[in-house]
Image (cartoon, rainbow, N blue to C red):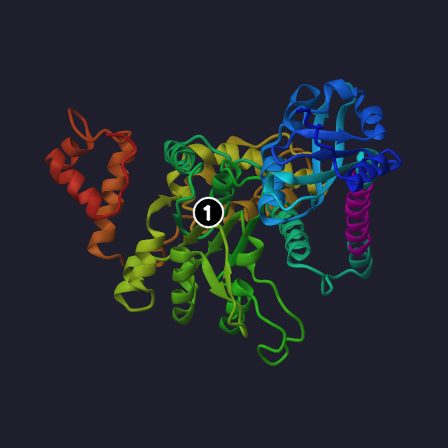
Amino acid sequence: MIVDKPRRPVFVEVFFNILGSIRQPLLVLDYDLNVVKANRHYYMKFVSQPAQTEGQSLFDLGNRSWDMPRLKELLAAVLLENAVINDFEVEQDFEFIGRRVMRLNASRILYRKSAVSQLILLSVEDVTDSELRKRNLEELVDKRTVECVAAQDEAEKRREAAEGALAEIQSLKEQLEAERAYLQEEIKLENNHERIVGQSDGLKYVLYKVEQIASSDTTVLILGETGTGKELVARAIHDLSLRKNRALVKVNCAALPANLIESELFGHEKGAFTGSHAKHIGRFEVANGGTFFLDEIGELPLELQGKLLRVLQDGEFERLGSTRTIKVDTRIVAATNRNLEEEVRKGRFREDLWYRLNIFPITMPPLRDRQDDIPLLVEFYVEKIAKRMGKRIEVIPAGVMNALQQYHWPGNIRELENVLERAVINSSGPKLRLADELKKPSRDLCSIPKTLAAVERDYIFQVLEQTKWKISGKNSAADILGLDRSTLRARMNKLNINMQKS
C-alpha cells in the first residue's frame, strides 16, 4: 500500500510564496527554532544559501552570529505565551557583513491546533545607518549644548564684570566660583610674598609642625600675639595641603559687627531680615572643598559658637531664614591671640568648641624671641617698601640694625613693617635712617601682670629654646630647671608646651 507524503496546507504554500515578494529579510522558524524558510532578501542581506540555512537552528546560522541569550528568551516567550517581539535592537558582528545594528520583530503563526505546528515569523531590519546618524546627531547636540552653556556662562561673567558688582546668578556653582576667584585674588594682594621669612629655631619648629599637619584635614589652632604672622601660617598650611587648588577663605571675627557675622559665615535668604533684598552665600559655602581660616576666633559671639561647633562636627548648617540643611566639606584653621582656656573658665567660650579646635595647636613665637630673624625681615621689608616708593636703599647701618634687634617689638612683625616704612620715607639717600627712636619701655609700661602658670610656661619655653629642646641629660632643660625628666614632661603637658624633640 502506497502512502502519500503529507503535504503542507495550501495557505502555508501561499504564505511562503508571499515571503519572497517582501523586500525585508524574513525567517520562518518552527517550534524548535529551526529555520523552515527564509526569503530571497534574507539570503541577499546575509550572503547565504538555502542549503546553509533551511533546517538549521537559528542560533547556528552565520557561524553562530545569532546565538544571543536574550533572543532565545524572547522567542521562547513567543511560543509559550503568544507574546510578540517589537523592535528588539541588537548590535552584533555578523558573518560576511561585519558589525551591524538590527531591529527584530517576531510573532507566532498557527496553521494547526497542535503546539508543535506553531511557526514564528521573524523579520530583520538593518538600521545601522540610521542608528549611527542618530548617535552622531546626539553627540553633536550634546557638544553644541556644552558649547552654548559655556558661552552663556562666559557672557554672564563679562556682563557682571562690566557692571562692577556681582548680580543675582543662575546657579550656586557659578556664584561660588566667582567668589572663590575674588577671594583668592584678595588674599594674594594682602600677602604678596609666598613664604615666611626667617630661620630661627622657633620659626623652624613652626614650619616643621606645618609640614606635619598640612596634608591631613585635621583642624588647626594657631596661637600667638597680634602681628606675629598667624595668617601666613594658615596660608602655608593651605598651600601644602591637598586643597591648595581651591580657595583659602578667611573671616576676621573681630572685624565684623556681631549682628552681621552670622550672615557672613552662614549666608542668608532673601527677606531673612530687614535690608536682605537678595540671597547671600556665606563664607562656609564659598570654602566648600577648600580651607576656611577663622582669624581671632576668640572674638566669636557665644551664641554663634554652637552653630560653628555643628559645622566642625557634622559639616552642616542652615542659612539665616532657611530650614534647608547645607552640607560642606571644608578644612578649618583658626587663630587667636587670646588664652582660650581662660576664656572657657570665664564662660566666654564654649568648652566643647575649645576641645574641637585644640586638636593640633601651633604657637607662633613673638618677634622678640626671633632676634636671628630680624636682619632677614628688615632686608625683605626695606626692599619691598623702597621698590613701592621708587627709592633705592642699599645700606642698613650696623647701629640701625642693632637698635632694631634690641627693641622688644610689642606689635611684632606688623610694628616692624610700619617702623621700616617710616624709615624708608625718612631716608633721602641710599642709607636707611630710622624716623623713630626705639627705646625699651619702662618696667611699669611693659610689665603686664601674668598668672603663675603663664610665668612658669614662659620660663620653661625659654629654657627649652636655649637647650634646643633637649629634655634630659647633661645641660638639658631638666638639668637646668632641677627637675626629673618625667616631671618636666608632665609640666609641659599641663602647660600645653608641645615638644620639638624628645
Q: Quadrant of residue 463?
A: top left
Q: Is residue 250 left or right of residue 4?
A: left
Count the marks.
Answer: 1
- Secondary structure mostly taken by the magenta-highlighted segment of the chain: helix
Q: Residue at x 74, y 61 (%)?
A: 165
Say whether residue 423 is visible. no
Q: Which residue is mark 1?
A: 230
Write the start and end of the magenta stretch as one range: 135-156
**Residue 139 magenta-drawn?**
yes
Q: Residue furthest front?
A: 1
The quadrant where residue 396 appears: top right
Q: Residue 329: horizontal and vertical position, in percent? A: 49, 51
The magenta stretch spans residue 42 = no
The answer to which image quadrant residue 54 occupies is top right
Residue 356 appearing in the image: yes
From the viewer's perspective, tell me whether residue 78 is left or right of residue 349: right
Front position in the image: 61 or 299:
61
Along the viewing direction, whichever of 122 and 275 lies nearer the viewer: 122
* Residue shown at the point (78%, 30%) measured from the top left: 38
Q: Hey, what amino acid is under mark 1?
A: Lys
How far across and down, in percent of the image, does residue 211 sit? 42, 33
Q: Position of residue 151 (x, y in %)?
A: 81, 49
